[in-house]
Amino acid sequence: MEVRLNKIKSAIMAYQDYPKPGILFRDIFPVLRNAELFEDLIELLVEKIKTQVPDVELIVGLDARGFLFGTLIAQKLKIGFVPIRKKGKLPGECCQVSYSLEYGTDVLEAQKDSIKAGQKVVIIDDLLATGGTMSAASQLVDKLEGNVCLCMVVMELVDLKGSAKLKHPFFSLIQY
C-alpha cells in the first residue's frame, strides 16, 4: 500500500496562487492521466471501503470529481452509483440541501428516488477543504433516509479542519 500511495502522492501537482492569490491548488489530474496510478488509486479506495464498510450498498459521488472516482469504485464493488450535483443539473424530482460558502450559499441536489431508506452509503469526493460540500452531501443523504457509513476523499487539507464539520465517519487517503 505504502509504495502505491507514495507514487500517487508524487504525481499530484501543486499550483501556487490558483485559482486566486494565496491558494495552493492540488491537481489530481496527473494521476488520472497515468493508467497504472489511476488503477492504484481506485484499488486503495476500494480496499478501504471493503475493510471499513464491507456491506456498502451504494456509492455517492460529489459533483464533479467525485464522479470520476465514484463510478469506478461502484463498478469494482458491483453496486450502484448516485451523483450529487449542483442545483438544476438533474432531471426529475430532486431533494435539496442548502449550505454556506465563504461568500454566500449553494445548493446540492439528488434525485428523490436515488437512495432507498436505510441503504448503506459511502460518499466520495476528490478533496476535503473546509468541509462544507461534504457536510451538505451527508445531510442530503440523511434527508433521503440513506445511512452514511463513510465519507471519503482522496486528499484532505488538514489545516482547514473540514473534517470537524462532519458527523459521519471520515477517511482521507492523502493529507496535506
Image: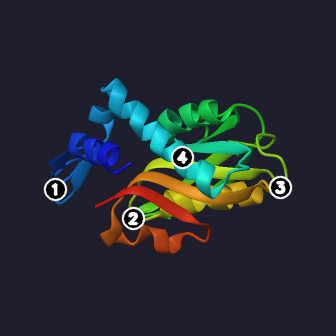
State the residue in front, 40 or 113.
40
Instruction: Kindly check if marks 4 and 2 are in contact, taking CB atoms under 8 A apart as contact.
Output: no
Question: Which amino acid type is shown beneath numbered disc 2?
Answer: Glu
Q: Identify residue for label 2.
A: 102
Q: Earlier in the sequence, mark 1 or mark 3?
A: 1
Could you give the CA–CA distance between mark 4 and mark 3, rounded to whole angstroms?
23 Å
Residue 113 location (% of width, % of height): 81, 40
Q: Nearer the viewer, mark 1 or mark 3?
A: 3
Could you give the CA–CA distance between mark 1 and mark 3, rounded to whole angstroms?
44 Å
Q: Residues within 10 Å of mark 4 (few under 14, many from 20)?
A: some
Residue depicted at x 59% and y 50%: 49
Q: Nearer the viewer, mark 4 or mark 2?
A: 4
24 to the left or right of 40: left
Mark 3 lies on a secondary structure that is loop
Could you give the CA–CA distance between mark 2 and mark 1, rounded to whole angstroms?
15 Å
Q: Identify residue for label 4.
A: 47
Q: Identify residue for label 1.
A: 21
Question: Which amino acid type is shown beneath numbered disc 3?
Answer: Gly
Question: Which amino acid type is shown beneath numbered disc 4?
Answer: Glu
Q: Residues within 10 Å of mark 2 (few under 14, many from 20)?
A: few
Q: Earlier in the sequence, mark 4 or mark 3?
A: 4
Mark 4 lies on a secondary structure that is helix
Question: Which amino acid type is shown beneath numbered disc 1?
Answer: Pro
Q: Earlier in the sequence, mark 2 or mark 1?
A: 1
Residue depicted at x 19% and y 47%: 14
Could you give the CA–CA distance between mark 3 and mark 2, rounded to whole angstroms?
33 Å
Residue 118 location (% of width, % of height): 83, 55
Instruction: Kindly check if marks 4 and 3 are in contact, taking CB atoms under 8 A apart as contact.
Output: no
Residue 139 location (% of width, % of height): 66, 61
